[in-house]
Image: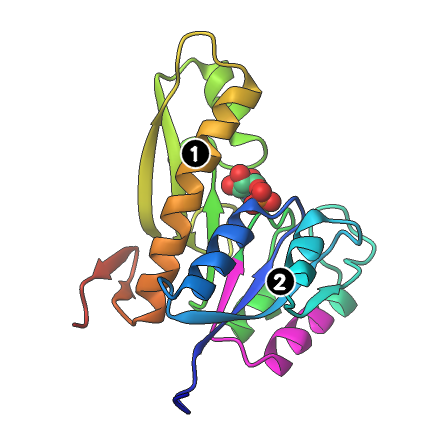
Amino acid sequence: MSGERKYRLGVLGSGKGSNFVAIADACAAGSVPAEVAVVISDVAEAGILDRARERGLAAQFIAPGKFRTKLDETAEAAYIRALQEAEVDLVVLAGFMRILKGEFLRAFAQRVVNIHPALLPSFPGLEAWKQALDYGVKVTGVTVHFVDQGVDTGPILAQQTVPVLAGDTAGTLHARIQEAERVLYPAVVAALARGEVGVQGRQTVWGMKG
Ligand code: GAR
C-alpha cells in the first residue's frame, strides 16, 4: 500500500443518494482517484446516510437549525467543523437542498461543487426537471458547477444534454436526467481530483495537467 494521501471528498445530501452512490462506487473501483471522507445530511432519515453506512463510510446527520432553505449560524459552523475535521479537499453537493453562503463558501473557497438537474442558466432552483417539462423544452440536461454566492450561478464545469420525449412525465424525465448525472458527476470529480480543471473568472479551464 502506498502512503500517498488520497484526495478527500466531503459529500452533502438531503435525499436518496444516487449521485453519492455513483461517486463512492467509482472511488472504490478506482476510476475516481479519491476517497469519501465523510457524508453529511440535513435530513436524519435520508437514504444517502444509509447508503454511506452500508459502505462503511462516516455518515453524520447535522441539524440545519431554524431556517427552511439555508443553515443557521450554529449549523453552518458545525458543517464547516465536520468537513475540516475530515480534512476534505472538495465539498460535493449531491442533492443537498439548502443554500450555502458566506462563511461556508469562504471556508471552502472554490472547493464546493454542485450538480443541477437542468442546463443552467435555464431552470435554476427547485424541481428543475419539472420546470423544463412545464416550459416545453425539447432538450434539457445536467450541469455540474462550482458553487458561488448565488443560487445555481457558479462557473460551469460540465454539462450533458438529455432529450425530453413525447409522453414524458416529471418522473420519467427526472429518471433519465439522473442516469446522466450518475455518469457526469463522477467524471468531473475525477478530473478535479487529478487537478485537471481550474477556474478563471466565469470560465473553467480543462486539461491543465497530464
Ligand atoms: C438530483 O437529481 C440532483 O440533481 C438534484 O437532486 C437530486 C438528488 O438525487 N439536486 C437539485 O435539485 C439541487 N438544486 P440523489 O439524492 O439521488 O443524488
Q: Could you tell me which residue is drawn at 30 percent across and 71 percent down? A: 194
Circle 1 crowding by C-alpha within 10 Å: few under 14, some 14–19, many from 20? many
Q: Nearer the viewer, residue 128 or 124?
A: 128
Q: Which residues are magenta?
A: 77-92
Q: Could you tell me which residue is drawn at 19 percent across and 69 percent down? A: 208
Residue 98 in the image, given as x and y percentages of width and height: 65, 50
**Front: mark 1 or 2:** 2
Residue 72 in the image, given as x and y percentages of width and height: 75, 61
CA separation, marks 1 and 2?
A: 29 Å
Q: Nearer the viewer, residue 129 or 194?
A: 194
Residue kind at label 1, given as amino acid type: Ala
Labelled disc at residue 12: none
Q: Quadrant of the N terminus?
A: bottom left
Query: Most extreme residue toward the bottom, as rendered?
Result: 3
Ligand 1 contact, mark 1 (Cβ < 8 Å):
no
Query: Most extreme residue toward the top, as rendered?
Result: 167
Callout 2: SS: loop
Q: Could you tell me which residue is drawn at 29 percent across and 72 percent down? A: 195
| Direction from residue 15 to residue 127 in the image, left or right | left
The image shows residue 39, relative to residue 137, as above or below, that is: below
Circle 2 crowding by C-alpha within 10 Å: few under 14, some 14–19, many from 20? some
Residue 148 appearing in the image: no
Residue 196 in the image, given as x and y percentages of width and height: 25, 67
Q: Could you tell me which residue is drawn at 75 percent across and 66 percent down? A: 75
Residue at the disc numbered 1: 118
Residue 88 appearing in the image: yes
Callout 1: SS: loop
Q: Nearer the viewer, residue 172 or 13?
A: 172
Residue at the disc numbered 2: 55
Residue 80 in the image, given as x and y percentages of width and height: 64, 73
Q: How has the structure been colored for display?
A: rainbow
